[in-house]
Amino acid sequence: MTAATREAKATNIVWHDGSFTRQERESILGRKGFMLWFTGLSASGKSTLATALEQHLVAHGVSAYRLDGDNIRFGLNKNLGFSDQDRTENIRRISEVAKLFADSTTIAITSFISPFKADRAVARELHNAAGIPFIEVYADVPIQVAEQRDPKGLYKKAREGVIKDFTGISSPYEAPEQAEVHIRTDLVSVEEGVRKIVAYLEERDLLTLSKGVKRDSNGVSDTPSKAIKA
């Protein structure tokens, strides 16, 4: 069963419209909300890139929020495992949550393995139907490099049979064929990857960064320059 075919169980409910359309909200707040969907193998660097991008955007005064695959499983999706059905439900839930962020004029940044093309297509269609731009960012890395990185020791456990249904080893990863942004994370730094994403967004008039950069009390202001390792 895919996310698209799940039947709604709730009855006697009516959608309650707010006082503003998304376009009116964007006009009043002076910013656009959209979806940046990071996908890739475990240890592909998608979370590192997503975190650095969020830091870069917020440092420039842009409303952005990152939803991380592991973090979500501590709360909203803590009752889901890693079977194909649970993976599909995991993506369905986060798609709906991320759409709310984007609808509020925040840039939603999701970092999920999201291994199945069909599930990512459902997430895209959900946003397209709402008129919200959906940008897929493929953090691409050879499986051999991902295994060499293995910051959490998960590939080793999967090879030993300790972890079942592990993407890239005992469960498939269906790579995007037409991602809007494709980054070989073993060939570029975090900073270069962030620049490529920002350039794509600016070219499509989704983002205009101010020249001034906000700094926090520790002097943190922008994306760190380092190699992608996780």
Image (cartoon, helix red, strand yellow):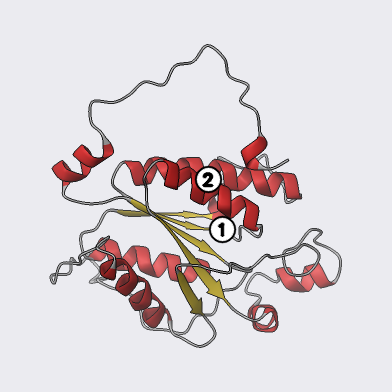
Residue type, numbered disc 2: Ile
Residue 74 in view, yes or no: no
Q: Position of residue 41 (x, y in %)?
A: 63, 69
Marks 1,2: beta carbons within 8 A: yes
Q: Residue at x 65, y 69 (%)?
A: 152
Q: Secondary structure at mark 1?
A: loop
Q: In the depicted view, which residue is nearer to us: 203 or 30?
A: 203
Mark on residue 217? none
Q: Position of residue 134 (x, y in %)?
A: 42, 55
Q: In the depicted view, which residue is nearer to us: 155 or 220?
A: 155
Question: Which residue is denoted by mark 2 in the rendering?
Answer: 94
Q: Position of residue 16 (x, y in %)?
A: 36, 20
Q: Quadrant of the C terminus?
A: bottom right
Q: Is residue 178 left or right of residue 197?
A: right
Q: Quadrant of the N terminus?
A: top right
* Local crowd size for mark 1, using a 10 Å CA cut-off: few (<14), some (14–19), many (≥20): many
Image-quadrant location for residue 200: bottom left
Q: Is residue 200 left or right of residue 29?
A: right
Please say if 197 is above or below 65.
below
Question: Which residue is denoted by mark 1 in the rendering?
Answer: 112
Image-quadrant location for residue 147: bottom right
Q: CA distance from mark 1 to mark 2?
A: 9 Å
Who comes first in sequence, dot 1 or dot 2?
A: 2
* Local crowd size for mark 2, using a 10 Å CA cut-off: few (<14), some (14–19), many (≥20): many
Q: Secondary structure at mark 2?
A: helix
Residue type, numbered disc 1: Phe
Q: Position of residue 108 (x, y in %)?
A: 39, 52
Q: Residue at x 48, y 70 (%)?
A: 48
Residue 118 in view, yes or no: yes
